[in-house]
C-alpha cells in the first residue's frame, strides 16, 4: 500500500537549465507535482507519479561524472576493489555516463549501457556501448548477440532512476552469470533522514532505497542482497551487493547490522515518514525566513553549485533571483544558463565569488569539505555559507 507522506509541490526537471528566460522559453517549461510515498508492505520510498524517462535522459543530459575529482577517485577505487574481490571476466555498467567507472578496466571486457546519446557518444570511442535504456528487451538482445553471462553488473546512481523495477531486475537476472554479482550504488534513505536532505527527492530519484527495501524488492526477481557498504558520496549513499538466489555469497555481518539499524530507526513505519515531513516543512520556513532577514539587511546572497538538489530546494522554498543574486558552478555547460523553474542566472565561480558576496547558499552541500578548502579566502574575509543540512544555519570562520 503506497502512502504519500511528503509534497514538495510543483517542480521542473532538476537538470532542465534554461538557455534564456524569454517569455516563450518560460511558457514551454515542463512542471510536475513532486509527491513522495512509502510502501507499507515492501518499505520502498518512491515518487508517486514519476516523469517519463524519455523526457529526462536526452542527448542534452548535463551531468558529466568525470568533471568531479572526488567522483573520479571514488570510481577508480571501487573498480580496483571489485576486480580484487570478484575477479570478473565480463563487466557491464548500466548508466555508464562518460565512462568514469568502466575506463578503469580492460576495454575488451566491458559493455556500457547509457541512454543519453551525448554521453554514449563519448564511450563508443573507447568500448562497446549501447545507447539504450536498460530493460528486458535490451537484455534479450545481449543474449542474442552472445554478450550474456556477465560476471559483474555495476550501476551507480541509475537503478534508483528507473521507474520499472520489474524490467530492471528481470533483465539483470537474465544476463547475470550463475555466480555473478550485481553492485548498485544509490543515495541512502537513512542518510536523507539523518541529514534532513529532502533535496535528494527530485524527478530523477524515482526511488530512495534502504537495505530493507532493496532486500524485499530483489527477492521478487530471483536475486538476493548479501552485503552493503556505506559511502560518503552524494551526501551518503549505500553500495548494495546482490547475487542470484542460489549464489554462493553469505549474508554479511555489516548487512545484518545495517538492516538492524534501519529497523531501530523505524524505516518500516509510516510514522517515521510523517515526522520527517514535518521536519521538512519546518526547514523550508526556517531557510526562507533566514534569507529574507539577511536580504532586509541588504546582504548579497548567492548560491554555490547549480545542483539538481538545489532545484528541489529553490522551487519548494520559493527562492528566486530577488533573494539569490546568482548561482556559481564550475560546469561549463551550466554557465550562462538559468536555474529550472526559478530562473536564477548561473555564472562561473571566478566571476561570481568576489568580495561583494556576503553569503553563499551551499547547493552542493555534499562537497562541503572540498568547497570550504577552496573558499578559505571568502570565509577569512567574513563571508558565510548557508546550509539547510542537517539544519538551517550560517557557517562562518571561527
Ligand atoms: P552533484 O554533486 O552531482 O549534485 P546533484 O546530483 O544534486 O546535481 O553536483 C555538484 C555541482 O556542484 C556540479 O554542478 C559542480 C558544482 N561544483 C562547483 O561549482 N564547485 C565546486 O567546488 C564543487 C565541488 C562542485
Image: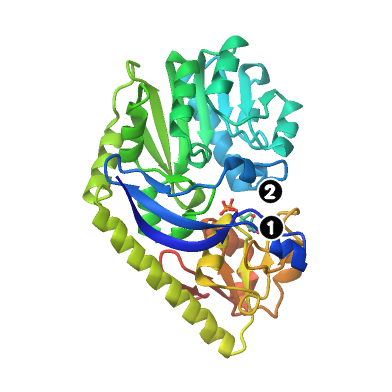
Q: Position of residue 50 (x, y in %)?
A: 50, 47
Left-right relation of 149 to 38: right
Of 194 and 133, nearer the camera is 133
Query: Which image quarter holds the N terminus?
Result: top left
Of 107 and 309, nearer the camera is 309
Labelled pair 2, 1 in contact (Cβ < 8 Å): yes
Q: Position of residue 236 (x, y in %)?
A: 44, 49
Left-right relation of 92 to 273: right
Of 158 and 265, nearer the camera is 158
Of 15 and 69, nearer the camera is 15
Left-right relation of 85 to 332: left
Residue 152 higher or lower than 365, as above or below: above
**Which residue is at 59% across, 13% downward?**
147
What SS does tag 2 mark? loop
Alpha-carbon neighbours of circle 2 within 10 Å: few (<14), some, or many (≥20)? some
Q: Quadrant of residue 380?
A: bottom right
**Which residue is at 24% across, 51% downward?**
269
Q: Position of residue 323 (x, y in %)?
A: 61, 78
**Which residue is at 72% across, 70% downward?**
352
Residue 143 higher or lower than 235, as above or below: above
Left-right relation of 366 to 259: right
**Residue 62: image tag:** 2
Determine which residue is flagged by label 1: 17
Quick check: can you spot residue 303?
A: yes
User: Which quadrant contains ligand 1?
Assistant: bottom right
Amino acid at each position: 500500500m503506497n502512502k504519500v507522506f511528503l509534497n514538495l509541490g510543483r517542480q521542473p526537471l532538476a537538470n532542465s537549465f534554461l538557455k534564456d528566460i524569454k517569455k516563450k522559453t518560460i511558457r514551454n517549461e515542463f512542471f510536475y507535482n513532486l509527491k513522495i510515498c512509502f510502501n507499507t508492505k515492501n518499505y520502498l520510498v518512491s515518487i508517486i507519479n514519476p516523469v517519463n524517462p524519455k523526457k529526462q535522459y536526452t542527448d542534452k543530459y548535463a551531468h558529466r561524472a568525470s568533471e568531479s575529482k572526488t567522483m573520479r577517485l571514488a570510481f577508480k577505487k571501487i573498480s580496483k576493489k571489485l576486480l580484487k574481490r570478484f575477479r570478473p571476466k565480463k563487466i557491464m555498467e548500466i548508466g555508464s555516463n562518460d565512462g568514469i567507472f568502466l575506463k578503469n578496466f580492460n576495454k575488451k571486457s566491458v559493455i556500457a549501457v547509457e541512454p543519453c546519446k551525448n554521453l554514449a557518444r563519448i564511450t563508443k570511442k573507447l568500448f562497446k556501448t549501447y545507447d539504450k535504456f536498460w530493460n528486458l528487451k535490451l537484455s534479450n538482445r545481449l543474449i542474442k548477440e552472445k554478450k550474456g553471462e556477465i560476471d559483474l553488473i555495476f550501476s551507480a546512481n541509475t537503478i534508483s532512476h528507473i521507474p520499472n523495477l520489474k524490467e530492471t531486475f528481470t533483465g539483470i537476472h537474465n544476463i547475470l552469470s550463475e555466480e555473478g554479482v550485481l553492485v548498485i550504488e544509490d543515495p541512502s534513505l537513512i542518510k536523507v533522514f539523518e541529514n534532513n536532505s529532502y533535496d535528494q527527492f527530485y524527478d530523477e530519484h524515482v526511488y530512495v532505497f534502504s537495505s530493507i527495501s532493496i532486500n524485499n524488492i530483489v527477492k521478487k526477481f530471483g536475486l538476493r542482497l548479501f552485503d552493503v557498504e556505506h559511502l560518503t558520496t552524494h551526501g551518503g549513499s549505500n553500495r548494495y551487493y546482490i547475487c542470484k538466489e542460489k549464489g554462493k555469497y553469505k549474508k554479511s555481518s555489516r548487512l545484518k547490522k545495517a538492516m538492524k539499524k534501519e529497523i531501530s530507526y523505524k524505516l518500516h513505519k509510516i510514522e517515521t515518514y510523517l515526522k520527517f515531513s514535518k521536519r521538512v516543512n519546518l526547514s523550508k520556513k526556517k531557510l526562507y525566513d533566514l534569507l529574507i532577514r539577511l536580504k532586509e539587511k541588504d546582504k548579497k546572497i548567492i548560491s554555490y553549485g547549480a545542483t539538481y538538489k538545489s532545484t528541489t530546494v529553490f522551487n519548494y522554498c520559493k527562492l528566486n533571483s530577488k533573494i539569490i543574486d546568482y548561482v556559481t558552478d564550475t560546469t561549463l555547460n551550466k554557465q550562462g544558463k538559468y536555474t529550472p523553474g526559478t530562473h536564477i542566472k548561473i555564472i562561473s565561480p571566478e566571476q561570481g565569488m568576489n568580495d561583494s558576496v556576503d553569503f553563499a547558499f551551499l547547493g552542493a552541500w555534499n562537497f562541503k569539505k572540498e568547497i570550504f578548502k577552496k573558499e578559505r579566502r571568502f570565509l577569512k574575509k567574513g563571508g558565510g555559507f548557508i546550509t539547510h543540512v542537517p539544519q538551517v544555519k550560517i557557517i562562518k570562520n571561527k
